[in-house]
Amino acid sequence: MEPITARHWLTLAAPKAAPALATSTVLILGRVWNANGAEHSTGNAALMVVLAAGSATAGAFASAGRAGDPVIAGTAFASSGALALAGVAGYTDGLPLPLLLWAVATAVAYGLAARYWRTDRREHIAHERHTIDRRETHAHVERVEALRAGAQIEVARTGAAYAEQLASALITRAALPGFNPQALTNAGLPELSATTEHE
């Protein structure tokens, strides 16, 4: 059987905290950038607008058509949102607008992550059910094979006991006084082997 391992609570909590950590990191970096000269800098704002638009365009191309890759598209759109948040946090002089965008970005990130968490949970439950079914099938096959082997052993034991009893009866019959194997043969009974007659 496969060993059962208990996962640490940090391992279980880390994916749930990842969206908030990501958006908070972007907000903090944007405010650090703001304190280092990005506040009201048109060139820096234009750079972030171009980068965010380019990332969003890449996400749109990645998700278009049947051959679209949802992982690449999701990464590109997430990058676009992060760049937009960082640009606003770096350009503005107050905290209300960056905090509002941080809250919106965090809510969107959790909304998207919840969808993937549900899918992952469904796949995990389906895998566990399949594993349990497979184990039960194997256990049933093992039980059937054990019963069959036990029955074969019992048949072999019965056959061995019968052969032993038959040999004992033949030896006992040959040792009786007045036993005449020729009389049995004349009576139409099967002839005994030479080994039995000498016994």
Image (cartoon, helix red, strand yellow):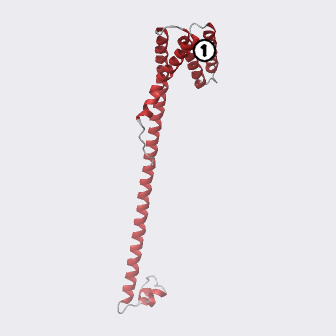
* Residue 118 can be seen in this image: no
Q: Position of residue 59 (x, y in %)?
A: 61, 19
Q: Position of residue 183 (x, y in %)?
A: 41, 89
The residue lying toward the viewer, choosing from 104 and 190, is: 104
Q: Secondary structure at mark 1?
A: helix
Query: As shown in the figure, which amino acid type bears the numbered disc 1?
Result: Ala
Residue 168 lies in quadrant: bottom left
The residue lying toward the viewer, choosing from 12 and 38, is: 38
Residue 72 lies in quadrant: top right
User: Where's the C terminus, which quadrant?
Assistant: bottom left
Q: Residue at x 46, y 17 (%)?
A: 107
Q: Residue furthest bottom?
A: 178
Query: In this figure, which residue is indicated by the disc labeled 1?
Result: 52
* Residue 157 can be seen in this image: yes
Judge left or right: residue 28 versus residue 66: left
Looking at the image, is 50 positioned above or below residue 68?
Answer: above
Q: Residue at x 42, y 71 (%)?
A: 159
Q: Residue at x 45, y 82 (%)?
A: 190
